């Protein structure tokens, strides 16, 4: 069987795609790149906003046509699969296999069954399942917990992914060992709310350390870089900032979603912290890591958000001076409390506020990135950039970086890079040697040699 997985959504979905791809391989399938060659197309879906749901709907429409014309098995996994909305789509578009986020290990049973297969149970084995390490990659994700115990009123994730369950440190460290053996040098620990690691459904789980302790354990494993996402402000205790500062492998990057700068809106979102409490966390982070890179998520146009509420979000942005932000227009999700109880604001109001927020984000990102010009950054280079002759990578603070290929630095690795230019979304620089001098440029092929080596020139 030739199979392909198409992924929408967050890093947790990317991790689950890797897990399911390795299941497919162990079941004897060949992984192929596009839909054209595949006889099994599995869509890993996201339901967090209306847009990713629309994308899945239109893809399912195309796949149903292919199924009619040449025969094809269609699968749907991930968050949307767990919801009535997704199951309705599955019936309409003749989906053969449906796997909720807790049922990924049912894939084998699904492929064996000759009828339509729907797996929607949360299976405990998933927590101890260690997918094989990705090969030839310097970066990997590692899920340390699944589900979410918060009840933010706009959010569908607790419904799709269920209550929080932390993985044991033993299982996490074994997975990490496999990643290290495969040559991985940067790991991102994943959870909807990593700071609540070890406290499942309100109670500390026996034998599971706090997130701060886990950071120290992972940092001592020999991995060079550790990142994590996402942090919920309510659980961001000062010991996490301290563990970050005291563990050299843990990168000084914090993604701390604020969602809104207005206490009234935060209350209606049921975020469980105030603006002041959030700013107190930022002060802790800056005290322990003066050079920390800060990112956030913001929702604009939450029901009832007034112009004054929105101004408070803009003011908070200035007070923190974020390096980057993911900004979303509120999207009412059926099944969430805010969908049931509050009226959506007019589209124009929401888009106009988003525009103003984007202007602010660009100003700050430009300012923060410009302050890095002249500094030396360790850049994890993943490989070639879109422009030939250039490589792309990212810093410990997650800034994307583009650098020209140089002698001694023309492939994946971690290199010291002097930053020379900055835009709001990108840093540019050169790899330097131990004395801080740029490495010599890689010689370009002479035009004649280039022409001869081109397959077209042989014709
Ligand atoms: N667990 C993570 C969030 C996962 S969802 C956390 O709490 O930080 C990622 C982001 O999507 C959220 O931070 C929020 O900003 C956004 N989001 C979630 N539901 C949304 C909705 N209904 N409309 C718009 N944005 C939403
Ligand atoms: Fe959603 Fe809130 Fe849980 Fe994040 S913490 S996944 S926003 S309910
Ligand atoms: Fe989307 Fe589920 Fe992630 S709803 S954002 S794929 S947790």
Image (spheres, helix red, strand yellow):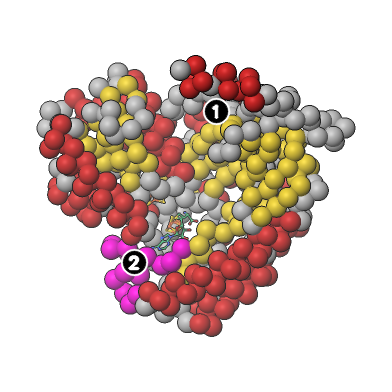
Q: Is mark 2 within 8 Å of ligand 1?
A: yes
Q: Which mark is residue 332?
A: 2
Q: Which mark is residue 366?
A: none
Where on the picture, by quarter, is residue 304? bottom left
Residue 98 seen in the figure: no
Residue plotted at (23% across, 28% down): 39
Residue 24, percent from left and from top: 32, 25
Along the viewing direction, whichever of 324 and 150 lies nearer the viewer: 324
Along the viewing direction, whichever of 303 and 429 lies nearer the viewer: 429
Tell me the crowding category of disc 2: few under 14, some 14 to 19, or many 20 or more residues within 10 angstroms, Cα based: many
Quadrant for the N terminus in the image: top left
* 421 in relation to 257, above or below: above
Where on the picture, by quarter, is residue 338? bottom left
Along the viewing direction, whichever of 291 and 41 lies nearer the viewer: 41
Specify which label sits upstream in the sequence, 2 or 1: 1
Let me know if residue 299 is in the magenta part: no
Q: Regarding mark 1 in the picture, which secondary structure is present there?
A: loop
* 132 in relation to 338, above or below: above
- The residue tagged 1 is 137
Tell me the crowding category of disc 1: few under 14, some 14 to 19, or many 20 or more residues within 10 angstroms, Cα based: some
Let me know if residue 333 is in the magenta part: yes
Relative to 136, is 29 on the left or the right? Answer: left
User: Which region shows up in magenta?
Assistant: 328-344
């Amino acid at each position: 069987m030739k199979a392909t997985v198409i992924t929408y959504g967050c890093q947790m979905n990317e991790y689950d795609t890797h897990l399911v791809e390795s299941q497919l391989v162990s079941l004897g399938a060949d992984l192929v790149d596009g839909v054209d060659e595949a006889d099994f197309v599995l869509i890993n879906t996201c339901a967090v906003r209306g847009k990713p749901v629309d994308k899945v709907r239109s893809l399912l429409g195309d796949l149903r046509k292919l199924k009619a014309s040449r025969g094809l098995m269609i699968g749907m996994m991930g968050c949307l699969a767990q919801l009535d909305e997704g199951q309705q789509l599955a019936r309409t578009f003749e989906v053969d296999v449906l796997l909720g986020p807790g049922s990924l290990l049912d894939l084998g049973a699904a492929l064996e069954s000759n009828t339509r297969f729907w797996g929607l149970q949360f299976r405990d084995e998933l927590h101890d399942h260690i997918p094989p390490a990705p090969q030839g990659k310097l970066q990997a994700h590692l899920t340390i917990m699944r589900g979410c115990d918060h009840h933010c009123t706009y959010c569908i994730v607790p419904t799709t992914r269920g209550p929080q369950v932390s993985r044991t440190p033993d299982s996490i460290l074994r997975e990490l060992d496999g990643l290290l053996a495969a040559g991985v040098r940067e790991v991102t620990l994943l959870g909807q709310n990593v700071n609540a690691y070890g406290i499942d459904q309100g109670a500390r789980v026996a034998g599971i350390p706090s997130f701060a302790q886990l950071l120290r354990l992972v940092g001592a494993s020999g991995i060079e870089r550790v990142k994590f996402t996402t942090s919920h402000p309510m659980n961001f205790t000062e010991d996490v900032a301290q563990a970050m500062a005291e563990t050299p492998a843990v990168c000084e990057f914090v993604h701390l979603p604020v969602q809104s700068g207005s206490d009234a809106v935060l209350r209606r979102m049921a975020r469980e912290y105030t603006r002041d409490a959030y700013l107190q966390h930022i002060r802790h982070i800056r005290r322990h890591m003066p050079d920390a890179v800060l990112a956030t998520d913001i929702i604009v146009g939450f029901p009832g958000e007034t112009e004054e509420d929105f101004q408070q979000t803009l003011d908070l942005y200035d007070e923190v001076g974020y390096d980057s932000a993911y900004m979303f227009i509120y999207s009412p999700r059926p099944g969430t409390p805010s969908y049931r109880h509050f009226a959506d604001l007019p589209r124009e109001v929401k888009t106009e506020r988003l525009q103003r927020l984007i202007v602010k984000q660009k100003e700050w990102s430009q300012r923060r990135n410009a302050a890095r010009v002249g500094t030396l950054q360790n850049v994890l280079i993943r490989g070639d950039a879109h422009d030939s002759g250039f490589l792309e990578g990212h810093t410990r603070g997650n800034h994307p970086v583009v650098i020209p290929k140089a002698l001694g630095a023309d492939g994946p690795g971690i290199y010291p890079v002097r930053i020379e230019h900055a835009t709001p979304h990108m840093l540019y620089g050169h790899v330097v040697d131990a004395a801080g001098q740029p490495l010599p440029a890689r010689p370009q092929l002479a035009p004649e040699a280039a022409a001869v080596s081109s397959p077209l020139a042989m014709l």
